[in-house]
Image (tube, rainbow, N blue to C red):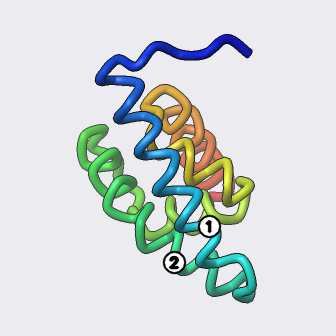
Amino acid sequence: MPKQSATPSNNVYDTQNEKIELFFKSLKNKPIVEQKQKLGDRLFPKVKTADKNLRMKIQANKITIIFLEINDLHELAHSMNDPDIFKVKFEAAVTKITAAK
């Protein structure tokens, strides 16, 4: 894998990834319920903002729960820093909720 240049955007991305990895190390031996709760606490504000921006009528807490159910937690945490991937995951959660109605 080629080495990335040390541009400010790469440094921010690397710092975000390091924080996520440290967060997951702190959860390593915790029960899955607690892992989901801790990640959900970080995920909820982002989902709430995305939901508000799209003017959806689905509650952010429901979307957050679906996020945690249908995604690998580690992958989900990293997607929070990638707007394109986060949008895809957000839309998948909304689709699952609306399909269940």
Indicate the position of residue 72 as horizontal and vertical percent values.
74, 55
Residue underneath mark 2? 38
Q: Which mark is residue 97?
A: none
Indicate the position of residue 10 as horizontal and vertical percent values.
41, 25
Residue at (35, 53) in percent of width and height: 46
Residue at (50, 59) in percent of width and height: 63
Q: Is residue 89 left or right of residue 84?
A: right
Residue at (54, 47) in percent of width and height: 94
User: Which of the image's four quarters has the C terminus?
Assistant: bottom right
Task: Identify the element where label 1 is drawn.
Answer: helix
User: Which of the image's four quarters has the N terminus?
Assistant: top right
Residue 100 position by quadrant: bottom right
Residue at (71, 77) in percent of width and height: 28
Q: As rendered, which of 35 and 17 lies closer to the eye? A: 17
Image height check: is 56 above or below 86?
Answer: below
**Identity of the amino acid at label 2?**
Lys
Q: How many marks?
A: 2
Q: As rendered, which of 44 and 100 lies closer to the eye? A: 44
Residue underneath mark 1? 24
Mark 1 and mark 2: Cα distance apart in space: 10 Å
Image height check: is 19 above or below 39?
Answer: above
Task: Identify the element where label 2 is drawn.
Answer: helix
Q: Is residue 1 left or right of residue 101?
A: right
Indicate the position of residue 67 as horizontal and vertical percent values.
60, 57
**Identity of the amino acid at label 1?**
Phe
Please identify, in this view, whether the residue under mark 1 or under mark 2 is nearer the observer: 1
Q: As rendered, which of 28 and 81 lies closer to the eye? A: 28
Mark 1 and mark 2 lie on one chain; the one further toward the N terminus is 1
Q: Residues within 10 Å of mark 2 (few under 14, many from 20)?
A: some
